Amino acid sequence: MARTMTRNHEHFRRALQRLPLGVASNFRYWGDERTIYVKEGRGARVTDLDGNVYVDYRMGYGPSILGYADPRVDAAAREGMRVGGVFALSTEREYQVAERIAAMVPAAELVRFSNSGTEAVMAALRLARAYTRRDDYVILEGSYHGLFDAAMWTADMANMTDPVKGPEIVTYGKGVPQLIRQLFWQVPYNDANRLETVLKAHAHNIAAVLIEPILGNCCGIPSKPEFLRAVRELCTRYGVLMIMDEVKTGFRVARGGAQQLYGVRADICTMAKAVANGYPIAAIGGREEIMRKFGRGIAHGGTYTAQAMSLAAAERTLTVLRDTSALADIAAYGTAMQKGMGRILSARGIPHSFTGHPSMSGLFFRETPTTNHLDWKDIDYTFYDQLAGKLIARGVMCEPDSREPWFISAAHDQSCLDETLNVFEEAVDLTLGELPADHANKTAPLMAGISS
Ligand code: PLP
């Protein structure tokens, strides 16, 4: 049945009068005719203002690890509210949640809290700079660490013309001071040699290597295990701190996050999305001697830091993740979904691959998965872009931007999977039917199997 968007459109026009682009976050604006407003989310499904129901694979970009409105977490949050709000004082539960985090993530010997991933990474970088007394830092191509000036830089792969010269490093949007460009080095992902070259020459000025173990905003590209081990080893050798940004991977890809998955321990790590099933809280964890610098010359805090409702939600979410098979179930669902999609695509001769962890993976129309941001540039996204629109219109809410992984929650069940695969098959066939005649020339790998 065709989806109606009447109420979504009406609300968009109303919202536009008071909110730039009609939304509260730029990423939520999908175009004047396509912006969706949620009425409610339950489990793995969201319902929009028109009553359209979607199996959701965005899950707030990852936070809803147990599903929307999880009754266990919501009950805990309500109980947390009874504490009374924010006090400009501490509460007992900070310690309890810090204990839980430290037990699950051994690198987090000590813990501090923030409200968002951005804030946590900002604090981690400040901590590293203060501890090492150096200002510079290294970031990796294709990474995203939040909306603060030091992190809002990216390699402009889409417009790169000279592979020898490499991509231009540009800001994510306007308003970021160009002066910051002098402070960081950006190196390709999964390339330890390039990292070593930078560290060898400049380590005396570099406070930290800031790395996402899996590129949560670039197709879910995972670190090769040997690369992450090399980053660890190089940081130790050159006396630079390793900050592992686990805002997306923390408490998702394993109970102890990517650090457990890879067996690599960072000096400082940040976790946010899955900590409290959508309630706003983030954590910074790290080696004791580094973390103890907080309060000894390093500023950290904030009015809403560790507010009672989010803390209570975090405690319950982490307990559920620790004591149940939630994460294994999520990974099993992700694997089953990939297999199902793979069968549908293979039956039509469409080369494809999946990247990342089954709980947050990217889908590519190429036989070999991409391993770095530059590689991504060479993939044709027309098919994904068209497919995504059809999936969403039919009730499967994937990310329209192919660089954002598909997120699975513990609330995704067999009915979600069946529905997803049925819709996926239909959408693939419709997309194939609509490809322009000259598409085969533009995307030889995609069409290789189809035209035969
Ligand atoms: N770090 C990573 C790896 C992220 O994926 C994000 C957000 O997507 C952030 C930091 C910023 O987190 P937040 O949006 O909570 O500020």
Image (cartoon, rainbow, N blue to C red):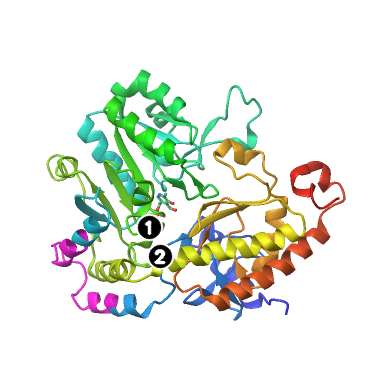
* Residue named by callout 1: 254
Image point (28%, 75%), residue name: 77
Q: Where's residue 21, x and y in %?
A: 56, 59
Residue 24 sits above or below residue 412 on the image: above
Which of the numbered marks, if any, corresponds to residue 327? 2
Is 433 situated left or right of 265 in this image? right
Q: Where's residue 155, x and y in %?
A: 53, 35
Q: Is residue 336 visible?
A: yes
Q: Nearer the viewer, residue 19 or 247?
A: 247
Is 103 situated left or right of 230 in this image? left
Quadrant of residue 321 within the rendered picture: bottom left
Name the quarter where the N terminus is drawn.
bottom right
Crowding near pointer 2: few (<14 within 10 Å), some, many (20+)?
many
Q: Is residue 48 visible?
A: no
Mark 2 residue type: Leu
- The stretch of residues the image draws in magenta is 76-98
